[in-house]
Each structure stands twice: as structure tokens, then as C-alpha cells.
Amino acid sequence: MTFYEELEWRGLVNQISSPDLIEKLNKGGLTFYIGTDPTADSLHLGHYSSFLITRRMKEHGHHPILLVGLATGLIGDPRGTVERELKQKEEVFRNYDALRAQVEKVFGFEVVNNYDWINGMNVIDFFRDYGKYINVGYMLTKDHVRRQMESGISYAEFSYMLIQAIDFKHLHETRGVDLQVAGSDQWGNITTGIELIRKTTGDEVYALTMPLVTDAHGNKFGKSEGNALWLDKEKTSSYELYQFLLNSDDACVITYLKRLTFLTPEQIMEIEARHNEHPEQRIAQKALAREIISDLHGEAEFEHAVEVSEKLFAGDFKSLSARDIKSGMKNVPQVSLTAGPLADALVAAKVCASKREAREFIGNGAISINGEVVKDVAWELTPAAALEGGIVIIRRGKKKFYMGEFA
């Protein structure tokens, strides 16, 4: 396969602005940029595919530049739904510093900041040098603007695409950038940049967009969707990422392997065949987790995530750190415990509805404390029973867990 054919095979091409781009992508030597706004202090899994295609292109001989848009981050990109909430300026600056450090560490890309050339621009220059070249009717045809017009769009957000166009023009003129790469939701913004460059310089530049990464229900992996998986392991632990990837839907997992890993087509097709023969073994999901976590955080973090998962499943809480337990039990009910007879403590923590129910659960061996079954209704729950960090893990029945700490 040619480089472009492999991008298509992996499902990484949504739109290109010109057929001429195909030969240029195959040949190598393009300087291109990809941008993100500092709306948070970490990238998330939704960004990961975009940054991987950037790395793929770099390995094929293209030169990537990452723009972290401090200027555009202060305005907000129309999402086609409702007006984006503006963050405090200090928060956006902190987010920029965090993202720049993360990208340089994880991906090794050169980072630029559009605040450097936008901040010093006056309003007259903005309108004379840029605004007069882009027709309002043209801007209104963009899907994300047209959709948001229904709920209301401020002039600031309406102007966002023009500022992104200025970014493209600036990088084209100062850094030789001839291509912008982004998710499919940025097509309207990128093509505005192409139009501005064509009208002001006569040069032809290009756009490539990728399909957004979505789950089995079509929801994208983004923090605005409420399901963000952060690339910063302090925000999303390797264990949490492992569990999410391990539970990827069979209908999506091969797509994820194509888009989110550097496994070769031959390796992916072999994994797919083995997975289809034994889907219960989750062969594809395990390969996906290994590749992503090892790439982001190192192979040792992947092995640790597997170990934590196995120990939590086996109820071996005592050999785990408080950090690992809290990560693994992040989504279970958090309860406050009081010392005393176990039945009383279970009722006080609302693990059981009544003392009678609590005694029945205990007598039937359906209550375990830190992985050990307790059948004695007179057993006293005290702080001495807590694990590292003062944590107590209560299991009721086979699957109902609670994480408790003494008040």
C-alpha cells in the first residue's frame, strides 16, 4: 500500500481538499500543522488519533507543527450546539503551559502559540487585512455555524473561523506550512483558511480531516461528552484506561486498532482473525490496551494496570497501594463508616437496609471485608481493619462493592 492507501485503510481520511494532496502525502516533505485549544490541562483519548496520524506523517518524511491556540482558546470554537462557556484567562494560560509540556513529552512535536501573532493585532488591521476577504454568506454556509445559529452565536465565536484562517496564513507565510490536519468537525474552519490564503497570496494549500473517534453509540471521546479519558495518568490512571479499552465493544475494537496503534495491517488482520475465533478471550481488546498504554506511559505502566486489574478481580486488596485501590474503586459508592458491630456498620453506611437484612447477608457469607468473607454477625468493624490509607472495601453479594473510610 502507498502511504495514502494505508491512511484510508486505517479509516483516517474523512475529507481532503484536493486530489493533488494524495501524491504529496505519498511523496513526503510537506510541512503541516495540527491545532488544539487549551480548554483543559490535558489532552484526552479523542485527541490521540489526531496526534498519531501526525506521528505517522512525520515517520513518512513530513514535518509536523503543533499549534496550541491560546488566542483561540480565549474565544471558544462554535460546537454547533450552544455557546461555549468562556474560561478565566488565568486558567487558559495554565492549561496552555500544561498542554505544551505534555505534547513535547509524549509526542515530541514542535509547539507554536497563536497568541504570539494574534495578541498584537489591532481591530483595524483585523478587518482590513483579513475580514474583508471572507464573505459573511460564505461563513454562514459552514455546518457548525449554521447549527449554532438556532440557539444563538456570539460575534466572538462567529469570528473564530477567521482567526483560525489567520493562523493557517501566518504559518504558511512564516513556516512554509501547506497543509492543515484536523478532525472532521474542523473542515469549515480549515477551508476558510484555504480561501483566505488563496485570495491574499494566490497560493494553493491543503486540508485533510479525519473521522472523529467514537464509541459504539456514536459518542465522541471528548470531555464535552462527559466521558473523557485523559492522557495524563494523574487524571486517568493506567488502570482506568486499561479497563475502558478492555471493555471496548467488539464492533469497534478493530477500528480502534487501526486508528490508535502502530501495529501493521498484517498484525491487525491476524489479531482480528484470532479475535473472531475466540471473542470471549478479548484478544483484540488486550492488544489495544497494550499498545495505547505502553505508547503513552510505558510498558511497565501497562503491566502494572494488568496486575492491579487481576488483584482487584481476585479480591486481593491487601497487596495493593491505596492509590491503586482508589483508582480501581473510583466508580463504586463511597461510604462513611462507624466503628461497631458489622451489622450496625452496614446499616449506617447504607450497604444494607436493616439490621435483619445485614445479619442475613453476613450469615449467608455474602459480606466480605477487604476480600475476606465475614460470617460472624458479632464481628466488630474497627479502624484496625482498614487497609493502607484508611480504606475499607466492602463487597455485598457477588458484584456490589463499596469503598469506605471511617468518619
Image (spheres, rainbow, N blue to C red):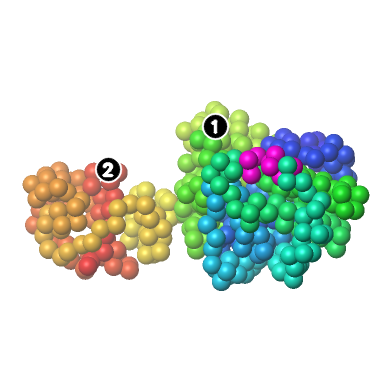
Give the labeled residue for mark 2: 398
Question: Is residue 288 in view from this perspective?
Answer: no
Residue 323 higher or lower than 360, as above or below: below
- Residue lying at 50% horizontally and 63% vertically, measured from the top left: 234
Across and down, in percent, residue 154 comes to 60, 53
Magenta highlight on residue 8: no
What residue did someone put label 1 on?
Answer: 251
- The image shows residue 372 at horizontal and vertical percentages of 24, 54
Residue 240 versus residue 96: which sits nearer the camera? 96
Residue segment shown in magenta: 138-146
Magenta stretch encompasses residue 139 = yes
Amino acid identity at mark 1: Ala
Q: Position of residue 123 (x, y in %)?
A: 73, 65
In the image: residue 227, left or right of residue 268: left
The residue mark sitting in front, 1 or 2, is: 1
- The residue positioned 50% from the left and 32% from the top of the image is 279
